Image (cartoon, helix red, strand yellow):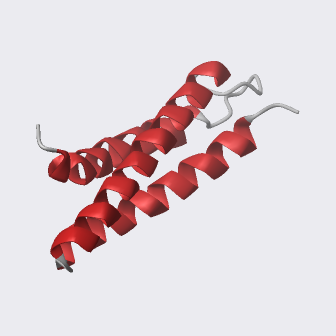
Amino acid sequence: MKTINFPYIAAGLGLMLMLVVMRGQVLGADGETVMPLLTLLVVSEFCFFVNAIAVYIGFKQIKAIGFQALYTITTLLCALLAVRFLFIGIALWPL
């Protein structure tokens, strides 16, 4: 796999796992989340790092070859997903 394709893969994986996390953090009738809390935290952390790496690779590639609309939009989507997963992980963390 070439690293140039990583932002596309990270965006797809991030969107899919965002759905999993959003469904999993819903509170049930007993007051607990549908998915175990540790699972939600691990998925959020994993997706944050994957998307942060994709942003790094994407901006490095954009700087090297110039502006490409689809690639730039995908890189920005990865940046938004990374920020969102960061905030989800912080919100889920029990203090």
Q: Give the residue displayed 31% in from the left and 62% down from the top.
A: 60
75 relative position to 61: left or right: right
Q: Nearer the viewer, residue 47 or 37?
A: 47
Residue 65 image-quadrant placement: bottom left
Q: Is residue 74 visible?
A: yes
Looking at the image, which residue sits at the far right?
95
Q: Give the residue displayed 16% in from the left and 50% down from the top.
A: 5
Rendered position, 40 above or below 60: above
Quadrant containing the C terminus in the rendered view: top right
Q: Give the residue displayed 48% in from the left and 40% down from the top.
A: 49
Q: Position of residue 46 (x, y in %)?
A: 48, 33
Q: Nearer the viewer, residue 59 or 77?
A: 59
Q: Is residue 23 visible?
A: no
Q: Position of residue 67 (x, y in %)?
A: 21, 80
Q: Position of residue 59 (x, y in %)?
A: 33, 65
48 relative position to 6: left or right: right
Quadrant containing the N terminus in the rendered view: top left
Rendered position, 94 above or below 49: above
Looking at the image, which residue sits at the far front?
64
Rendered position, 35 above or below 25: above
